[in-house]
Image (cartoon, grey):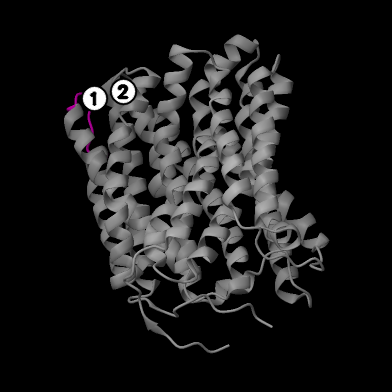
Amino acid sequence: MSTVQLPASREGLDPGFVRLSLVMLTGALAVVFDTTIVNIALETLGQQLHVPVSTVQWVTTGYVLALGMAVPTTNWLTSRFGGKKVWLFALTLFLAGSVGAGLAADAPSLIAFRVVQGVGGGLMLPVMQTTLVQATNGRSLGRAMAIIGLPVVLGPVLGPVVGGLLVQHLTWRWIFWVNVPFCVAGLAMAWRFMPSGERNHTAPLDWIGLALVCPGIAAIVLGFSRAGAGGFGHADALLPLVVGVTLVAAFAVWALTRDGEPLIDLRLLRHSSFSAANALLFLSGFVLYGAMLLIPLYYQQVTGRDPLTAGLLLVPQGIGLMLSRGLAGALTDRLGARPVAAAGLAITLVGTLPFAWVGSDTATWWLVAALVVRGIGLGAVTIPVMTSAYEGLAADQVPHASVITRMTQQIGGSFGTAVLAVVLDSALARHPGGPAEAAAAFGHTFWWSIAFTVLALAVSAWLPSRIARPTELRPASP
């Protein structure tokens, strides 16, 4: 269906969209923090539940696997039941999992409730993206993404800080109970203010696609998780990666050749702006998530800071993120995605360079300033990239785009973290000794993160240079 292309809108955000954003972000805050908040408490969990690291690690792994398997189902669920019902169901699941995890008496029950949390969280974020993008009706999409993308950037920065504060001053159970007020408030607000959304009661479920992609994504994430601990050559990492890639490849063939509507419409990747945006979201695994593994580890292993202090030293990056988001959204609407993303990546690179030259006695103020700069760059990158992912899509394509972008971010984050963890382990083995040698190993690993930032800068050339957007989302394809 052809559309009339008009210049990017410079109008402000619709008040109805702002209200809906506040409603959904209230509930989503629990998921934002929970993805990373638990990591800082794993050692405490192992000690107090009297289980080894290999067991307590499943508190995180089980959550991530459940989250990954739930994401591909959201398009069908929202089409069948409507966005509001799916959102309320997912938020209720997350609330139940949080309460259960906070009351867990042993490790198996804690892991089980974390899986429940993961299913709820996996449904919530794509539903939020779809609902809010459709609520913009295609107008001021850059400004809207400054709000919609908050969970992606704030979770890795603030999660460890919140987790450290709770574990140090309260008990480990509070890392789960802290979710309860957000979930309760989010449920009440969504019940009152959230529109029900369109439903297609006859939408068939792609059972074959479901059986291929859900375990495939889970196997890939599991493989990367194990690779980060022991390398890619070990069978316990290589086997799930091979199985996962095979299943996802089989799903891609199935989705592109079947007659009916697939579980996930991969034909969207034929749009150059959408494929470029997803390539950049994948590389964000190195630029954002991988570096977020390295920075607190440097503070702990090289400078001897405790986990809470290391988490607090990440706050300057969060400040930088918040400083740039409003301006980046407005510039994306006015100038297009390419120049804003390229500038953001260049600023991110500048902010990361001091960590590549880091030593055991590098001044803290210097690294804090670098993190502010790095945060400004990251805040300017995510908005134009996510805007490009939805640029020019029909209304019925938005849910598919939300699922694909969430999957890309999760796999990219797992891959980037695993690769940089392997590089760091190898560098530490080559530089045995004291803090100075460890700092050299961290500097070497940060150069890898910088290299992938340069690669992302090259990929950003495929983003649209200037956004020419229809005044509203195209109607659903007949």
Q: Quadrant location of the C terminus?
A: bottom right
Q: Is residue 331 above or below residue 66?
A: below
User: How far is the residue under mark 1 from the one under mark 2?
Assistant: 6 Å
Predominant secondary structure, magenta span: loop
Residue with the most extreme front position:
192
Left or right of 33 in this view: 256: right
Tell me what residue is drawn at x 59 percent, y 79 percent: 475
Give the number of the disc on residue 279: none
Of marks 1 and 2, which one's residue comes earlier in the chain?
2
Left or right of 402 in this view: 167: left
Amino acid at dot 1: Ser
Can residue 220 be seen at all in this image of the molecule?
Answer: no
Splitting the image into 4 quarters, where does residue 11 fall?
bottom left
**Mark 1, other Cα within 10 Å: few <14 / some 14–19 / many ≥20:** some
Q: Which residue is mark 1?
A: 360
Tell me what residue is drawn at x 37 percent, y 27 percent: 311
Amino acid at dot 2: Val
The kind of secondary structure element at disc 2 is: loop
Point out the stretch of residues depicted in magenta.
356-363
Which residue is more in the foreground, 285 or 226?
285
Can residue 118 be seen at all in this image of the molecule?
Answer: yes
Which residue is more in the foreground, 287 or 386?
386
Where's residue 45, x and y in %?
A: 58, 16
Where's residue 55, x and y in %?
A: 66, 22
The kind of secondary structure element at disc 1 is: loop
Which residue is more in the foreground, 99 or 305?
99
Q: Which residue is mark 2?
A: 302
Which residue is more in the foreground, 338 or 139?
139
**Mark 2, other Cα within 10 Å: few <14 / some 14–19 / many ≥20:** many
Tell me what residue is drawn at x 25 percent, y 57 percent: 346
Where's residue 155, x and y in %?
A: 45, 39
